[in-house]
Each structure stands twice: as C-alpha cells, then as structure tokens.
Amino acid sequence: MADRPEGSAAQGDNRPKLSLHVPEPKFRPGDTVDFSHIEVPAAGSAPRPDEACDPAEMHDLAFGLVRVLGDDDKAHGPWDPKLDPDTLRKMLGHMAMTRAFDERMFRGQRQGKTSFYMKCTGEEATSVSASMALAGDDMVFPSYRQQGILIQRGYPLIEMINQIYSNKGDKLKGRQLPIMYSSREHSFFTISGNLATQTPQAVGWAMASAMKGDSRIAATWVGEGSTAEGDFHSACTFATVYNAPVILNVINNQWAISSFSGFAGAERTTFAARALGYGLAGLRVDGNDALACYAAERWAANRARANAGPTLIEFFTYRAEGHSTSDDPSGYRSAQERSEWPLGDPVMRLKNHLIAIGEWDEERQEKMDLEAAEYVKKVTKEAEANGILGHGLHHPFRTMFEDVFEELPWHLREQADQAVHERETKFPEGLPEA
C-alpha cells in the first residue's frame, strides 16, 4: 500500500479501522439447514402489470416473487396462464424427458463414455416452461444448463448424445466441450463455455431483428454468478438504450460451482433488482413453479413484440445436483439443502397440479417416466454405435483443418501437410481407420 500523503492523519488516530466483508453461505457440510429467511409469498399475490407499462411501475416485482401454484397444488392469481391440460401434460413430458436424459448421460460419464456432463435437476421449469412461452423461431442464446430447450423444440436426442460423446456422428466434429450444443434449425445459438458472452450476443441479435423489421425476438439464459461479468452489464446497457426485443433470463440457483450466490451480490439485493438501475423491466419469479415460469416468459415476450422494451427475469430456483460431473457439492454445502428447499421440485409440483385438477394420476406419471427412460436408453445405444470417448470412432483426422476458413490460409496448409507427413511416417503400413 502506498505511503500516506503528507498532512494525513497518523495511524494512531481515533478513526475506526476498516474491515473487509467476505460473503459466507449460511450452511456448510454438517450444518442444520434453515431456510426460514427466504420469504415465500402466497401464490397469486403478485400483481400483473400491463405488458407495455413503464419499468418504474414494476419496482416491487423485482423484490417479490411471482408464484402461481399454491400449497393446494391449484393455480392462483393474475399470473395464471390458464394453460389447457394437454399443454400442461406436454410440458410435464418434456420435463420428464429432460430428467431421464440427464440421468442416462450422468451415468454414461461415470462409465467413462464421455469426459463431462452437467445436469439441470431442479431447474427444468426455467428452460422447458420458459421456452414453451416463446415462438419456435425466436432465437435463444442459452447457457450450459438449458438442455430442456432443445428437448422441448424437438431436437433429436441422438444428435445431443453424439455431441456429448464427440463421436463420428457429432455435427460439431468434437470441437466443443460436451453439452455445448448448437442448432441453427432450432434457433439455438451455440453454447459457449466463456461465461456471459451470450448476453451481448442476444441483445445484438435482437437489435438486428428490430433493424430489419423482423418479428422474432431473442432470449438468453445466464447463471446468477455470471451476472458479475462485464458482458452482462454491457448487454443490459445496450438492451435498454436501444429498446432491444430481448429477454434476459437469470437463473439464480443459489450456487456458482462451489461459490454461493453472495459472491455475485445476492446478499445485498435480488438479481431482478439489477434491472432497475438500467431502466429495464424486472421480474423475480418462483423458478420451481412451471406455470409462473411460463407466465413470466410469455409476459416478457409479448412486451418485446410490442416494442415496449426488454425484460430481465430472475428465476429463483435451486441447483439440486453438483455443478457438473467434476464437482462434489457435499464438500461445500449441507446435505440437507436439497430436501429442505422451500420451493420444492418443479416436476413434482407440476405433476401434483395436474392430479389436483383431475387431469393426471400417479400411474400415468410412472408410465411416462418409464417410457422416457426406455426411450433415452434406446437412443443412447444408437449413438454409442457411432463411438464413445477413446474408442476411435471419431471424425477423420483431416477435418481438424476444415470448416473454419472458406479458403485455408497458407500457414494452416503447411501445418496440415506436416501433420499428414507425420502420420504417414508413424503408420507406414497404412493409417488406422478413423
């Protein structure tokens, strides 16, 4: 630290000493969990403003919690989207399929078939329900826990598994970390491992759509920890300045790897409240309430389509599993947290709602779960015929130099020639099949 400037008070003066605050989660391994500090308002108590309202009118909605499903498993209040039973069953089916897919891929990683996987257990509603509220051709810029969007949009599971296994069927040719999908046909922008880069990209795409007079909007998903990145704040600035038709979805699942949400600012205020300083519309939503997730996303989509402005939505949820297959949450959080989380499980809550309105039962749920598991198992075997990690069934060696430049630069041509020469030297009897 630099010397004190001349004329400043000496160290022995009577001014109080400063101290640095370091955020600390309320519970660590072995602690008893008590979530009583979380305010859970009654379902249906949050007002629903007009979709074209001034963001200043939404101040309280950035600090409250939009909820539809009550303790009685019934829908309540002005945010009830009043979806028909068939739509609710379809929503439940996508969530069940997402969970079954996660289970199978997690098991595959543990069996050494892939290097990496990330589950979204407990967060399914924030992707499935939210994406169902968008048009199928609205452009989505996801983070790495939104596999439910692809499943909801009908992307073939075998293509997802091929990408996870980086095998010869992988359309991305092994150039992306497993689970970082991409599908132009499904308006699903390529996932990036660099945190928050998708937020300015989504805003820029939305601005371009508006400039062209198109009808499509953009939506992006980002974890609460990533809101501390500069890219997120740049995105908020551009979104509000240019009134971009975009939805910024912040998934507050309480943890960013082993760092709890306090390191991103959760101790001071809500993440939805960040919208206020930018002049954005801000909503804080029960992320484990599938109906609330749908209703909030549809509200924001309608607002964007009406040229009324962008919206920042905080989905207040809980990451029930580890951050990834490389993470063990038992090393930094209480084992009781998952069972004590006050907002429950999104799949169970939607299932119970359908049962409560007489449109579902436990037998059909059991059948749905079994069919989903069996289907994922079947497709996984089909994908494994294209290869798994380390078994040699991957794209031909030459493809390493393809698909990046329209015309290969001279220095890469030299590298390609050198690589081919080295392989021919190493395998004089002929190259192994690849």
Image (cartoon, rainbow, N blue to C red):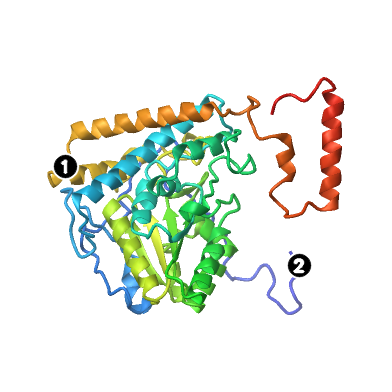
Tag 2: residue type? Ala
Q: Nearer the viewer, mark 1 or mark 2?
A: 1
In the picture, measured across the screen, residue 212 lies left or right of residue 83, that is right
Q: Which residue is mark 1?
A: 355
Q: How many marks?
A: 2
Residue at (41, 75) in percent of width and height: 309
In the picture, measured across the screen, residue 93 lies left or right of residue 364, that is right
Asked if residue 61 is positioned above or below residue 335 in the image, the reply reads below
Decide if residue 326 is in sight here: no
Which residue ends up furthest to the top in the rendered image?
A: 429
Decide if residue 172 is in sight here: yes
| Frontmost residue, 62 versus 123 | 123
Asked if residue 175 is positioned above or below residue 210 in the image, the reply reads above
Asked if residue 298 is positioned above or below residue 127 in the image, the reply reads below
| Frontmost residue, 365 versus 319 | 365
Distance CA(mark 1)–CA(mark 2): 67 Å
Quarter occupied by the C terminus:
top right
Residue at (52, 63) in percent of width and height: 202
Answer few, some or many: residues within 10 Å of disc 1's Cα (few below 14, many 20 plus, some between 14 and 19): some
Q: Which residue is mark 2?
A: 2
Task: Give the mark nearer the N terminus: 1 vs 2.
Answer: 2
Image coords of residue 64 (percent x, y): 31, 64
Tag 1: residue type? Ile
Q: Mark on residue 244?
A: none
Image-quadrant location for residue 394: top right
Image coords of residue 278 (percent x, y): 47, 74
- Please, what secondary structure does the residue beneath circle 2 have? loop
Image-quadrant location for residue 204: bottom right
Image coords of residue 262 (percent x, y): 48, 55
- Please, what secondary structure does the residue beneath circle 1 have? helix
